[in-house]
């Protein structure tokens, strides 16, 4: 039986923390349930998952739908799209059976690439290699989650670029149903002897084809910061999401970006293995950040205390603490009112 390989290439960078990552995991389970309920898909579809943040790895090699179990997605710093494409091409070479004079190989693979930001590596060489050697051998559908996606890069990969925006409750579930339907439609067309890509109609209330990429925005969609609990030594991620605030005077009115607290999330240690380790000096001023969370591990009042080493830790108020990063003793006191203008802290790549 000829297989229909389906590859999911998923952005697991810091900006996906919280609802986006949870929805992705829940969505996978819904897709698998749908495919298992369709006889054509159950017979032909094989799934693989490639995750990328600062690095990229195959977390589920190509396997039949019946045996596929949705994985727990990792989280890391960076959005290495070039590394993700390299991992995808290596997986296609390793897993997809080619047609030879003696046998029929697998059907043309389907690839679903999901991302919500801008590459933090140089994807140019990988994009060139994809277009030269793989673009005709696979059907790639690139999905940008939100308008802050770098659609100009995605358009260099494929004409099938889709913008997804969740504007109402239930939009993500409807989006997952569309993905399931597109895989089922392709498997059915193969079952009927038609080797053509068949995509369901887009629901334009939350999806649209990107024809002309919108200009890249100067401001990042979010600010992320990594800290450690001083009691448990476990890491956490603080996420702030961008909002535009109206500023008006007697003469003019304009909008400035601010970042409001979205949440503070516990991390596993493998976050660092999935993060881009290249040295960067990205900073944000605390005056641009609204809200300070408590520690998700021990419940300390604030997870936003900065050691002299530049790293974040949690404290429960003015006190002496041991930094879980550099192991030095640090004394925290209230900041003088004269210093309320804020200070710079290191931020993640997002």
Image: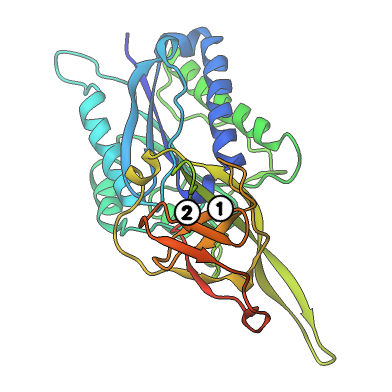
> Mark 2 = which residue?
226
* Vertical placement of residue 196 versus 101, above or below: below
- Asked if the residue at tag 1 contacts the one at tag 2, i.e. Cβ–Cβ closer than 8 Å, the answer is yes
| Residue positioned 63% across, 73% down in the render | 287
Is 123 positioned to the left or the right of 163 in the image?
A: left
Q: Nearer the viewer, residue 284 or 21?
A: 284
Say which of 106 and 49 sits in front.
Answer: 49
Quadrant of the snapshot with the N terminus: top left
Provide residue 234's location: percent of width, then percent of height: 45, 42
Tell me the colour scheme of the image: rainbow
Q: Is residue 49 left or right of residue 293?
A: left
Q: Give 321 or 133, whichever is nearer the viewer.
A: 321
Q: Is residue 167 above or below residue 23?
A: below
Mark 2 or mark 1: which comes first in sequence?
2
Tag 1: Cα neighbours inside 10 Å, few (<14), some, or many (≥20)?
many
Q: x and y percent of residue 238 in the render?
A: 56, 52
Return the residue found at the far left: 101
Q: Which mark is residue 131?
A: none
Counting every numbered tag in the picture gives: 2
Q: Mark 1 highlights which residue?
A: 238
The quarter of the displayed image where residue 156 is located = bottom left
Where is 246 relative to 234, above or below? Answer: below
Residue at left 55%, top 69%?
Answer: 219
Tell me the element at label 2: strand
Is any part of residue 194 visible from this angle? yes
Which residue sits at x=43%, y=56%? 323
**Real-space CA distance between mark 2 and mark 1, rounded to the nearest whole angstrom:** 6 Å
**Image location of residue 221, percent across then percent down:** 57, 60
Q: Position of residue 128 (x, y in %)?
A: 26, 53
Residue 334 quadrant: bottom right
Instruction: Report if residue 150 is visible in the image.
Output: no
In this rendering, position of residue 26 left or right of residue 197: right
């Amino acid at each position: 039986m000829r297989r229909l390989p389906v590859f999911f290439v998923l952005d697991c960078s810091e900006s996906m923390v919280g609802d986006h990552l949870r929805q992705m995991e829940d969505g996978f389970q819904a897709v698998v349930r749908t495919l298992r309920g369709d006889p054509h898909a159950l017979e032909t579809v094989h799934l693989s998952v490639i995750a990328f943040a600062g690095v990229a790895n195959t977390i589920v090699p190509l396997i039949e739908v019946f045996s596929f179990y949705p994985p727990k997605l990792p989280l890391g710093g960076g959005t290495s799209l070039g590394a993700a494409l390299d991992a995808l091409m290596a997986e296609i070479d390793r897993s997809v059976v080619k047609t030879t004079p003696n046998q029929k190989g697998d059907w043309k693979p389907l690839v679903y690439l999901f991302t919500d930001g801008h590459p933090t590596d140089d994807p140019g060489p990988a994009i060139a290699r994809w277009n030269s050697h793989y673009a005709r051998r696979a059907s790639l559908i690139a999905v940008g989650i939100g308008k802050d996606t770098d659609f100009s890069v995605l358009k260099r990969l494929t004409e099938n670029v889709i913008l997804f925006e969740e504007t109402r409750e239930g939009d993500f579930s409807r989006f997952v149903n569309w993905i399931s339907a597109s895989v089922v439609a392709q498997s059915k067309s193969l079952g009927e002897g038609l080797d053509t890509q068949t995509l369901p109609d887009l629901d334009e209330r939350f999806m649209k084809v990107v024809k002309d990429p919108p200009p890249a925005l100067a401001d990042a969609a979010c600010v992320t910061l990594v800290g450690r609990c001083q009691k448990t030594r476990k890491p956490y991620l603080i996420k702030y999401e961008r909002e535009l605030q109206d500023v008006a005077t007697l003469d003019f009115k304009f909008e400035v970006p601010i970042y409001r607290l979205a949440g503070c999330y516990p991390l596993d240690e493998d976050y660092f293995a999935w993060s881009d380790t290249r040295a960067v000096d990205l900073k944000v001023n605390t005056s641009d950040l609204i809200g300070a969370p408590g520690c998700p591990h021990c419940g300390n009042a604030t997870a936003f205390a900065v050691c002299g080493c530049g790293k974040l830790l949690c404290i429960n108020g003015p006190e002496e603490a041991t930094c879980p990063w550099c192991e030095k003793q640090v004394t925290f006191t209230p900041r003088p009112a004269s210093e309320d203008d804020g200070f710079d802290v290191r931020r993640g790549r997002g």
